[in-house]
């Protein structure tokens, strides 16, 4: 289950097919060290998008 408190690194390890969805939201650095400690919700705040929209896209495409 994909949750907004899930770490990006955890998501990528469990579901690498999520990478294109993350990149479509402007998260081009999905492999950077920060992604290992940053939640989806934190990334949404940093990158300026709605976390609920990201979760919806991930659930539809992953």
Image (tube, grey):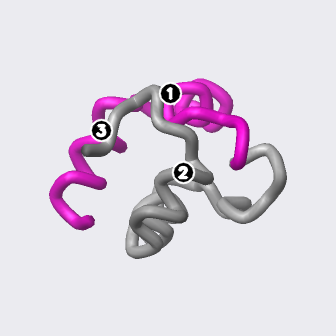
Given the current orientation, which residue lies at the most extreme right position? 33
> Badge 3 local density, few (<14 within 10 Å), some, or many (20+)?
few
- Magenta run includes residue 41: yes
Given the current orientation, which residue lies at the most extreme left position? 60
* Residue tagged 3: 53
Q: Position of residue 59 (x, y in %)?
A: 20, 52
Distance from the alpha carbon under mark 3 to that under mark 2: 19 Å
Q: Specify which label sits upstream in the sequence, 3 or 2.
A: 2
Q: Identify the magenta region.
A: 36-62
Number of disc labels: 3
Of helix, strand and loop, which one carries label 3?
A: helix
- Magenta run includes residue 56: yes
Q: Main secondary structure of the magenta part?
A: helix
Q: Residue at horizontal 30%, vertical 38%?
A: 53
Q: Position of residue 46 (x, y in %)?
A: 67, 30
Mark nearest the camera among 1 and 3 is 1
Q: Residue at horizontal 72%, vertical 64%?
A: 31
Distance from the alpha carbon under mark 1 to that under mark 2: 13 Å
In this picture, is 39 found above or below 34?
Answer: above
Q: Residue at horizontal 83%, vertical 52%?
A: 33
Left or right, residue 32 beside residue 23: right
Q: Specify which label sits upstream in the sequence, 1 or 3.
A: 1
Distance from the alpha carbon under mark 1 to that under mark 3: 11 Å
Examine the image and state in which quarter residue 17 appears: bottom left
Q: Residue at horizontal 40%, vertical 30%?
A: 4
The C terminus lies in quadrant: bottom left
Mark nearest the camera among 3 and 2 is 2
* Residue tagged 1: 41
In this picture, is 45 found above or below 34?
Answer: above
Examine the image and state in which quarter residue 61 appears: bottom left
Proximity of marks 1 and 3: CB atoms separated by less than 8 Å: no
């Amino acid at each position: 289950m994909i949750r907004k408190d899930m770490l990006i690194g955890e998501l990528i390890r469990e579901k690498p097919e999520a990478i294109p969805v993350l990149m479509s939201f402007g998260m081009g650095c999905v492999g950077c060290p920060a992604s290992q400690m940053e939640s989806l919700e934190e990334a949404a705040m940093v990158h300026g998008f709605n976390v609920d929209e990201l979760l919806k896209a991930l659930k539809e495409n992953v």
